[in-house]
Amino acid sequence: MSEDGMDDWAAAMAEQADSEADDQENDDVQVAELDELTDDTPITQEEKKKLDTILDIPVTISMEVGRSQISIRNLLQLNQGSVVELDRVAGEPLDVLVNGTLIAHGEVVVVNDKFGIRLTDVISQIERIKKLR
């Protein structure tokens, strides 16, 4: 404990908060006025039919815990009880893939004795396009 009764963690947090407050006071921050993005244009019947067609296309969604590369020799030696090391650290978010494309990260949950995934971070369209290049 430090002299003023706070433990080291609380003292470090207070010091960080003071530092951030000083940084904010020294910066010339200007708030930008942004217009609200709205599209009041109604969808035509033809556009609605096209959208309905796309919405019915099936996709494959999968959750990837991790990956590993092993030789065929080691693959053939695997049997019940074998352990394969993955490239992920325990507790790291899983990848959510749609048709093989990363769209989000998430964590495993159990609902009514079934596994599920809670999305923690959804990849933006811009980031997905960058990964295609």
Image (tube, rainbow, N blue to C red):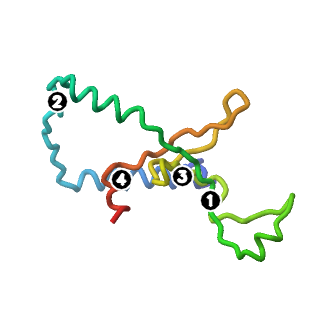
Which amino acid, mark 3? Asp
Check disc 1 and report its element: helix, strand or loop.
loop
For marks 4 and 1, give the CA distance. Answer: 37 Å
Q: Are marks 1 and 3 in contact (CB under 8 Å)?
A: no
Of the image marks 2 and 4, the number of the one nearer the N terminus: 4
Which amino acid, mark 2? Asp
Q: Give whichever of 26, 53 is nearer the camera.
A: 53
Please provide percent x and percent y for residue 87.
Answer: 63, 65
In the visual, does 18 lie left or right of 5? left
Q: Which residue is mark 4?
A: 20
Residue at (22% x, 29% y) in the render: 47
Residue at (14% x, 26% y) in the render: 41
Of the image marks 3 and 2, the number of the one nearer the N terminus: 2
Q: Which residue is mark 1?
A: 66
Please provide percent x and percent y for residue 51.
Answer: 30, 31
Q: Which residue is mark 3?
A: 95
Check disc 4 and report its element: helix, strand or loop.
helix
For marks 3 and 4, give the CA distance. Answer: 33 Å
